[in-house]
Amino acid sequence: CGIPAGQSEKQTVEAGICTIEAFFRRIGMPVSLTELGIRPTNAQIAELAAGCARATGGSCGSIKKLTQADMIEIYKMAQ
């Protein structure tokens, strides 16, 4: 992994995620809910996202506003 110059925004984001994940693995840090022993159901993920949305007034983020639907997708990707 690494973050080469001259890539698209998506490629840069994906390279950044890969780099951070590799670092976390090197230091023995879990990188998914499953690695933490957590396996939430879809209903639990929806509940987590709803709680996050409530706590942030419906959306969060400064660069990109995340909706509750975005939060659900993030939790699903974190499994």
Image (cartoon, rainbow, N blue to C red):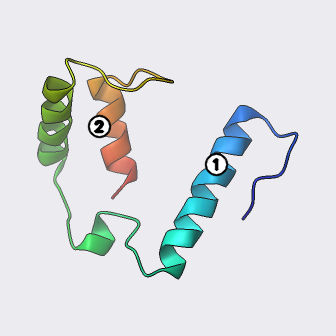
Depth check, front residue: 64 or 75: 64
Dot label at residue 67: none
User: Would you say 13 lies left or right of 8 here?
Assistant: left
Above-or-below relation of 25 to 77? below
Instruction: State the image coordinates of residue 50 (x, y, percent, origin top left).
Output: 15, 31
Amino acid type at circle 2 is: Ile
Which residue does the image show at 19% across and 44% down from the upper left? 45
Q: Residue at x 37, y 72 (%)?
A: 30
Q: Which mark is residue 14?
A: 1
Which callout, 2 or 1, points at the residue further toward the start of the chain? Answer: 1
Crowding at mark 2 (Cα within 10 Å: few <14, some 14-19, many 20+): many
In the image, residue 30 sits, relative to residue 44, either above or below, namely below
- x then y, percent, for residue 15: 68, 53
Question: On the rendered image, what quadrant is the N terminus found in?
Answer: bottom right
User: Would you place residue 68 above or below residue 37 in this image?
Assistant: above
Query: SS at mark 2?
Result: helix
Q: In the rendered structure, which amino acid carries the disc numbered 1? A: Glu
Q: Secondary structure at mark 1?
A: helix
Q: Quadrant of the C terminus?
A: bottom left
- Residue at x 71% of width, y 33% of height: 9
Q: Disc 2 or disc 1, which is closer to the eye?
A: 1
Which quadrant would residue 32 be assigned to in this image? bottom left
Q: Which sits in the foreground, 32 or 25?
A: 25
Marks 2 and 1, how far apart at CA:
19 Å
Return the mark for residue 72: 2
> Residue 38: where, in percent of width, then height?
20, 66
